[in-house]
Structures are given as structure tokens and as C-alpha cells.
Amino acid sequence: MIENVNAVTCIIPAYNESRTIANVIETCLKTPEINEIIVINDGSKDNTLAKLKPFNKKIKIINLDRNHGKGYAVVQGIKAACNSHVMFLDADLINLEPHHLYSLFQPIIENRADMTIGAFVASKSLSHYTLWRFSGQRCFQKECLIPLIKKIEKTNYGLEVFLNEKFKKKRVIVVPLIFYRKYHLIKPRKQKDWLMSYTREVWQVFQQTISVKSYTYSEKVKSEFLHSLACYLKISYKRVKDFLLEER
């Protein structure tokens, strides 16, 4: 593929996202500026790979034989990307529209930012806006990511915390993504697997947070990272609570 200076590569890591992945891809295909879509099937155990096959001629599929984690998966996408602008999207989004994507990548195309971060905003509330630090919806100048590839591979669910730290002195724009309906799907997993997954996710975020080496210990304690982590734990608790109520 010949690089288009105004085009965007969309990288979508997916693990057991058979219910939502097709909708995310279809939204990307409706967005003219996105001329390359790379989906990394990160060792899914459900029908995610089967859901990708109808798009085989329109997207690149990287199929990993086992689950390596989010950080490793997105690196495979970065390595395969042909464009100088790359966007990360979660595979479990619902009600996603092209205008959400445009808001993310336009500042990058116009060279007004090195990274944009999509902050979910419900139409009647700004309660989730403060959680932008953990958002997986991001767009970058690819050249800013290349030197970080080896470290990104090891971040797993701590990817967003790592990127926040590495880009703190660069041009970052937080973009409100306004949704009038739900934007994430609650996954009907078995209770044990679901709880283990989110426990692991929270632990990896915590590890990445305390591993930031540019602050002293006292500065870390006072930093907004701990506040953000508390918000994240609160949302994770709500997810568990909602899931248990669904199971009844």
C-alpha cells in the first residue's frame, strides 16, 4: 500500500469480542480517511476470528495463536501499519459513529497533536469524562510510537497509563466523544472468568502506575495517577456489580 499523508491506520486488538467487533469494523469502513484497518485477534476463544472472515478482503487480520495481552497485540498492528497516523480502538465499542473517529484523528492529520485521547461523555452526564486517562481510543503520529515499541509490548492492560507518562511532555489533546446511548457492551462471561479478567486488568494498571520512574515517591502519592486509579477501580466495581445483577 502506498502511504497517503492524510490517511489513518486503525489498529483494533480483540480478545473474545465476537459480539461487537463487526460493528466497530463497519464504522471504520464508513470513514474515508481510514484506508487501512488492522485487527489483531489476540488468541480469542470465542468466534471472533469467524466474525472477521467476511471482512477478509477489506482489512488486515493478524491472528495470534494465544493471548499475549493488549500491549503486545497493538505492537503487531503498529509494525504492520503503512500510514504515518495510527489510531487505537477497543473492539467492544457499540453505537460508534464516523464522527467520533474524525474527532480523534483530525488533530493528528493536521499536526496539532502527537496523541489524541477519546473521552467518553454520556449525553446527560460528564461523569465518565474524568476517566480519559484509561481510554483505549487514541490516535498518534506513528513516529512517536516507534521508539517505544519494546516497552509497549510488556504493558498489557497498563498500556494507557504507560502512554500517558511517555506523552506527558508532548502535544496531547483530550477529545470528548459524546454518546447518546451505551458505548460499551457488558460481556456475559462466566462469573469466575469475568472476575479474574478484571482483577488481572486492575493489577496490571496498578503495576504500570507505580513503575513510573520520573516521579519521586512523594510526588507519586500526590499525583493524579492515584486519583485516576481510584476512579478506575470504582468503574471496575460497577462492572462486577452490573454483571452479578444480570446473572440473577
Image: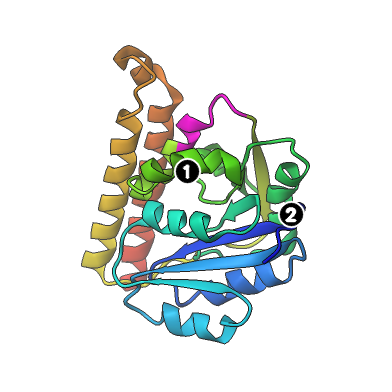
Residue pointed to by mark 2: 102
Across the whole image, how many numbered discs are drawn on residues? 2
Q: Amino acid at mark 1?
A: Phe
- Which residues lie in the magenta part? 163-170
Find residue 67 and report its horizontal and vertical position in percent.
Answer: 30, 65
Tell me the residue at 58%/81% (across/down).
55
Q: Find out whether the residues at labels 2 and 1 contact each other: C-beta distance under 8 Å.
A: no
Query: In which quarter of the view is residue 41 placed?
Result: bottom left
Q: Which mark, residue 234?
A: none
Residue 189 versus residue 62: which sits nearer the camera?
Answer: 62
Residue furthest toward the front? 2
Asked which secondary structure carries label 2, the reply is helix
Residue pointed to by mark 1: 134
Q: Amino acid at mark 2?
A: Tyr
Classify residue 44 as left or right of residue 129.
left
Find residue 69 and report its horizontal and vertical position in percent.
Answer: 34, 57
Classify residue 189 as left or right of residue 6.
left
Tell me the residue at 32%/13% (across/down).
218
Q: Magenta includes 168? A: yes
Give the quarter of the figure containing the C terminus: bottom left
Tell me the residue at 67%/67% (across/down).
1
Residue 48 versus residue 100: which sits nearer the camera?
Answer: 48
Q: Magenta includes 209? A: no
